[in-house]
Amino acid sequence: MNNPRGVLYPALHKFYSALSSLEKFEKGTNFFDNISYLDSFFSEYRNITFVLQKSLAHTEFNATYEEFRDRYLVNDVGKWFIGKRNEVLKQQPFDLEKRIEIRIYSGQDTISLPEAIFTIDNDVKYSTIIDSLRKTLIGVGQVEVMFSAEFSFYERGRKEDLYDNFISGIGQMKLFMMAMKTALNEECKLSDELEKKIESLNFYRVPKDMLFIDDYVFYCKKNNFEKALRIELSVGPKQTRIPIENFNKAYPDGDLFEKFELMHLVIFQMQKTLLPTCLVLFSDDTFQLQTFGGSLKTTIYRKLHEIADRIETDGIVAVFFVTEMYVYDANDIAMFDSRERLKHARNEILSFFMVDKDLTMKSRSFDLKKINDFEYIASVMFGKASKPKQLEFMNPVVQKFNRIRLKSNG
């Protein structure tokens, strides 16, 4: 088929309109606007199949449409989307609920403050919530306090996270549209342009934590907050696991810790810098790499905390971590916050850490001034092993593995 305006074009445009509405939905936006964006999303999302049915009327593709619709769209999330569309059009605006959890990170533990719940009846500005924490954070008694604010959204009275339903529904609709495009086998420039615009939207592509979590530090002496700037690299779908044998083929010598070291030493030599990276090893001999960065240490604490939360449910058996670090004389920095300490740093190092389910721990550090000296690197990697250093931000992982061991030993 070769149409200037293809059969699939109207449905793609409705899909784009639905996603464009969801793109405006943000954690700090007021309830009135966010509810309007959700109402528009449900309406436009449901209209996708309406307009496609009309486009396919009197063609030989009706049976194909019904087959793919039943395969990809007839499920619990699809039924919920239909119900919400009918509700927001004929009864009332979407009944949105917002929850905010504040987590405070320290070297010993993570403290979660009581969850704050808001609806359109009691909403307050995000900045007000953060500002109200001053007294609590000063009471911690530290020079600085690292914490994160995590947002989650629900339909009032229900337990399902809206984000999970949105991602599931969007993913199924993308599969449905892809299957229909293949079956129709048509050329349409407008459809091609819309597909590119859809692929450029952020809501369903950007990691959830980038959308709904903010990292902060509170400087107690200065009585002010700083919000982190962040970056996260993605090498594929979030749940993708890679067989560890692929890693072993690329780096055949040494144990996994040494292979992890070698990989990132080479990267550092090429780039002269390196983002913090975790290698998470699972019990089925697969792994995931998580590479991220932030202007505050809070992001590292949170990421390791999130990995610790997944250890038991996901079958994680080891966690490897690499990051650039500053070296200080301990007596010089006790009273300084992170920003003030920088001028007291005496060296920079690239540090590697590992802890596994048996509480085996390894660590090694390389002086950045000698990072291109292969003899130096070999002397560190194959020299006498020193006592493993345990960084504070690795504590959640260590503690989780330890609790699992104690529970299994009964």
Image (cartoon, grey):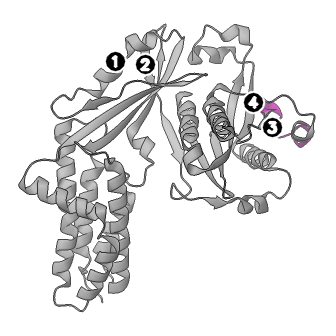
The residue at which mark 1 appears reads as 131
Q: Horizontally, is 159 left or right of 119 in the view?
A: right
Q: Nearer the viewer, residue 200 or 98?
A: 98
How far apart are labels 1 and 3 at the CA level?
43 Å
- What range of the chain is rendered magenta? 366-376
How far apart are labels 1 and 4 at the CA level?
36 Å
Mark nearer the N terminus (1 vs 3): 1
Count of marks, rendered view = 4
Q: Are marks 3 and 2 in contact (CB under 8 Å)?
A: no
> In which quadrant of the rendered view does residue 75 lie?
bottom left
Question: Going 75% across and 18% down the picture, which residue do you hit?
Answer: 346
Q: Give the amino acid at mark 3.
A: Ile
Q: Give the amino acid at mark 2.
A: Phe
Instruction: Give the x, y percent position of residue 171.
Output: 38, 63
Q: Give the amino acid at mark 4.
A: Ile
How far apart are labels 2 and 4 at the CA level?
28 Å
The residue at which mark 4 appears reads as 349
Question: Going 38% across and 58% down the picture, which residue do you hit?
Answer: 200
Mark nearer the N terminus (3 vs 2): 2
- Residue 371 is marked as 3
Q: Quick one: label 1, few (<14), some, or many (20+) residues within 10 Å? A: few
Q: Does any portion of residue 147 appear in the rendered image?
A: yes
Q: Are marks 2 and 1 in contact (CB under 8 Å)?
A: yes
- Residue 225 is marked as 2
Instruction: Give the x, y percent position of residue 95.
Output: 17, 44
